[in-house]
Amino acid sequence: MSENAFVDLRSDTVTKPTPAMRRAMAEAEVGDDVHGEDPTVNRLQERAAEIFGKEAALFVPSGTMGNTIAVKLHTRHGEEVICEARSHVYNYELAMMAWFAGCLARPVKAEDGILRWRDIEPHIQPLSVHWARTGLIALENTHNMAGGRVMPKEVLDEICDHAHERGLKVHLDGARIFNAATYLGSSVRELCAKVDTVMFCLSKGLGAPVGSMLVGPADLIAQARLYRKRLGGAMRQVGVLAAAGLIALEEMPKRLHEDHANARLLAEGLAQIPGLRIDPSKVETNILILDVSGLGLTPDEVSRELKARGVLAGGVSATEIRMVTHLDVDRAGCLRAIEAMRRVAAAALEAKHLLGVTPA
């Protein structure tokens, strides 16, 4: 990373394709994917299904589209979808479960972002003349807004077992499921064995320029292809993107531990700065949520001050900013970010002192 370049910690979506990805894109064998004739897309889909131990897979432009299609596949209009209160499907997908699938979200708060069966069970509704029936349980692993927290396999399996006993399906928003598997020392196949469908992103920690995958039973994926068409996601010679996706899928999970180590380094450094609050022991993967309220600045103000010092981050609440490590931020970049935050904090606390304000 150039010393003059920004340290971009806004998200792992900002990654640039690697030289190997660019070469593969330039040389990709292509065909018309709407007719199922793009050989590179077909290889990507077959390989994704194999890696996850599912029957089939579908390449989609975005994770939001993948989740939207999955909710539609598993539900009927007028049903409820149980999800965690800070989940992506509930907060950051433009209410697509309502707009496209005709379903109502039933958000359930979990303190650490990890839903457990004991949290879910009281909210399951049977068919009634008064309330909407539960149609689906949607989980998220890792949990973005809980700071990249990982749902353990035994927790995920327990939910799936009880849900299936009730005749309910489970969809997993696994945008960063390879980060979860890395943290647990597991494979995505083992981790996702009991869920009915999984969406995962190629364009986040895996570094592809665009694209996500939806994996599951062959009959559902065939139906998903039609929903993708309805949402405008049918593409033609898209092998130029799938070629990068293949490298992302095969090669990039091997290096995710580096992002996790950098996130922990970043958290440990930030935890030493007066006015900031973060528990490094809770930083499990590549995301950290940092409380900046002790500085007397809003997250947007902190972000502006960081940008002036060469670091990009973004506010996620009235008191917090999020930082995400990825393949384009190395250890040196994390150290630069810590030093930039140290200067921002020192200036903010000095201003509070001059104004006679007692630091929080």
Image (cartoon, grey):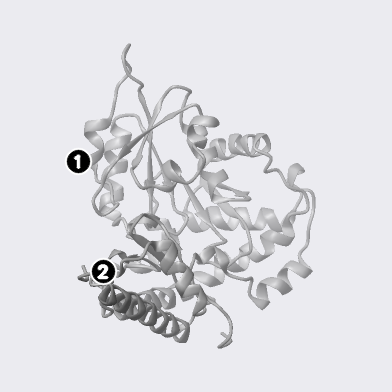
Residue in view at x 28 percent, y 79 percent: 273
Write down the residue under mark 1. 118
Residue 104 in the image: x percent, y percent?
41, 29
Residue located 23% across and 51% down the image: 111
Of residues 105 and 44, the one nearer the viewer is 105
Q: Quadrant of residue 247?
A: bottom right
Q: Is residue 122 left or right of residue 138?
A: left
Among numbered discs 1 and 2, the one appearing first in the sequence: 1
Kindly tell me whether residue 196 is visible in this rendering: no
Residue located at (51% from left, 73% from top): 307
Quadrant the N terminus occupies: bottom right
Amino acid under disc 2: Arg
For mark 1, give the secondary structure: helix
Q: Residue at x 26, y 45 (%)?
A: 158
Can residue 322 be seen here? The reply is: yes
Q: Secondary structure at mark 2?
A: loop
* Circle on res. 64: none
Q: Estimate how packed mark 1 is, as few (under 14), some (14 to 19) or many (20 or more) residues with alpha carbons within 10 Å.
A: few
Q: Residue furthest front?
A: 355
> Seen in the image, is 332 located left or right of residue 213?
left
Badge 1 amino acid? Arg
Rendering quarter of residue 211: bottom right
How far is the residue under mark 1 from the one under mark 2?
A: 30 Å
Residue 51: x %, y % from top left: 50, 59
Percent x, y of residue 204: 52, 63
Q: Which mark is residue 277?
A: 2
Out of 14 and 337, give the one closest to the viewer.
337
